[in-house]
Amino acid sequence: MKNKITKFMICFALGLTVQAGAYLYMDRVLFAPLASGDYDMSDVKDKVAEAAEKEGKKTFSKVNVKGKAYYSYDYKYMADVTADSVTIYKAENLSNPQKVDLKNQGVSFFEWMPDRNLALMALYPIHWNGGRWDVTLARYNPEGTTHESDAPIRDLPRDAKIVSVAYSTATNAVYMKMEVGKGLYRIYRTDANYDTRRIYVQTSHIGKIAVFYDEDRLFYDDSQKGIMYTFNGDDSSWRVISPPGAFRLVGLGDDKTIYAAKINSKGEAVAYYTGKLGVGFKEVKALPSPVDFNSVTVHMIHEAALQAASASTK
């Protein structure tokens, strides 16, 4: 009888030990939170941003969009933009949209500011019947009663349009890329005082433009020669910033990192580079085969830089 009790106690103790070990394994290994090295924090941020974007857009899913949808940074507003109309929907009142009075103008560019519910619209005379060709960059506040317009840019070549805008939310400096002919561009600058002027640059083949978020400093590239430049709005100085070879500007990061791609004679991207003013550039990834430059994004180069940095620490 005593032996049976002893065996029972031993089996019971072994069972508890095995069960405890199983729970410990599940708690410490199987279901344990990942260490920082087990995942990329940028991926987590991207997933959070994607979830917020999906939820924000869901609010406007019942709207019959006629053109292209543009969402404000907090998804409080959505703009339905066509070639000659802008209709703005408020998330809380979808049945009563605002139809923006464009004064019979066409829209060549539209974008919400990244930190406030204010839109930038580039307008041009879509129904031109002769006379001067004027182009305007307008600012529209959906929470106001009227939109506020910058001084128009006058006497441009016929069919000229603003096709891209780069701005600093801290300095209120806005740079406009103006198409004045097939593949030919100019740069204009305006500010909070509506002082609008042309910025004379070193090329008419302007590729991408970008600015620092807190400085009046423009970045652009020559899409034909593969040269990157920076323009200082404070003193109107400029200089070449690209390394030896042919490079195209891809964009800027919040930490003032400059993202660029090295290109071949066909204008295709063959390598990713990152750099900073006063420091220079470094290659973060050589591509196994050339790719279309227009398919390269800041996110792609940023991810390549993170992977390169992680590999160098191992």
Image: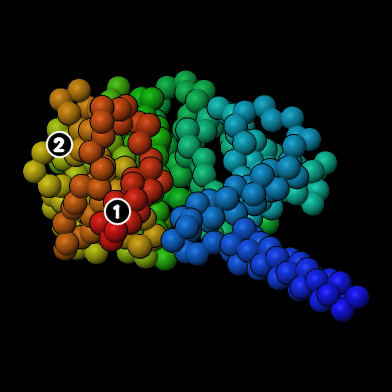
Dot 2 crowding, Cα within 10 Å, few <14, some 14–19, many 20+: many
Q: Is there CB contact under 8 Å for labels 1 and 2?
A: no
Residue 41 visible at all: yes
Q: For marks 1 and 2, give the one nearer the viewer.
A: 1
Above or below for 199 versus 215:
above
What type is the residue that disc 2 sits on? Ala
Residue marked by disc 2: 246
Q: Residue furthest left?
A: 244
Residue at (83% x, 41% y) in the render: 95
The residue shown at (69%, 53%) is 76
Secondary structure state at the residue bearing disc 1 = helix
- C-alpha separation, residue under disc 1 versus residue under disc 2: 27 Å
Looking at the rendered structure, the secondary structure element under dot 2 is loop
Question: Residue at point 29% right, 58% down?
Answer: 314
Q: Horizontal placement of 13 versus 100: left or right?
A: right
Residue 71 at x, y = what percent? 61, 45
Residue 135 drawn at (x, y percent)? 42, 37
Q: Which residue is mark 1?
A: 311
Quarter holding residue 86:
top right
Q: Going 47% across and 57% down the picture, which residue do you hit?
A: 38
Q: Which residue is at the far bottom?
A: 2
* Spot occupied by residue 164 in the image (x, y as percentages of width and height): 40, 39
Q: Is residue 172 left or right of residue 47?
A: left
What amino acid does circle 1 point to? Ala
The one of 89 and 29 positioned closer to us in this rendering? 29
